[in-house]
Image (tube, helix red, strand yellow):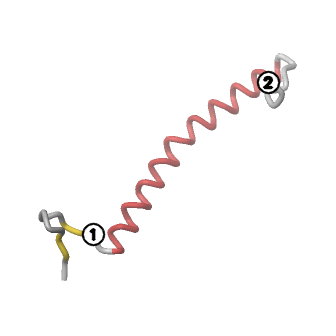
Amino acid sequence: MRFFTADGQLVPTPEESAEQEAQRADQQAQRAEPQAQRAERLAAKLRELNIDPDTI
């Protein structure tokens, strides 16, 4: 059995909602990874210059 809103929109099942949320979380993690890598490279460069990135 499927449910629809008053304006005809399909209401997702709990399983569909969970799958959509898992996909959103995966996409967010994929976007965050390059940013974390860039931050680590910048911190390493600062350390090479004898600058503590945690104090600036």
Q: Is residue 33 left or right of residue 20?
A: right
Query: Which residue is at a point 57% across and 41% down the rendered structure image?
Result: 33
Q: Earlier in the sequence, mark 1 or mark 2?
A: 1
Position of residue 42 measured from the top left corner of the image (x, y, whole percent) = 70, 25
Position of residue 3 measured from the top left corner of the image (x, y, whole percent) = 19, 75
The quadrant in which the C terminus is found is: top right
Q: Hey, which residue is sitting farthest front in the picture?
A: 6
Q: Which residue is mark 1?
A: 12
Q: Is residue 38 above or below residue 49?
A: below
User: Disc 2 residue type?
Assistant: Ile
Which dot marks residue 1?
Answer: none
Between 45 and 20, the residue placed more toward the observer is 20
Q: Which residue is mark 2?
A: 56
At mark 2, the secondary structure is: loop
Q: Is residue 46 left or right of residue 1?
A: right
User: Disc 1 residue type?
Assistant: Pro
Query: Which residue is at a point 81% across and 31% down the rendered structure image?
Result: 54
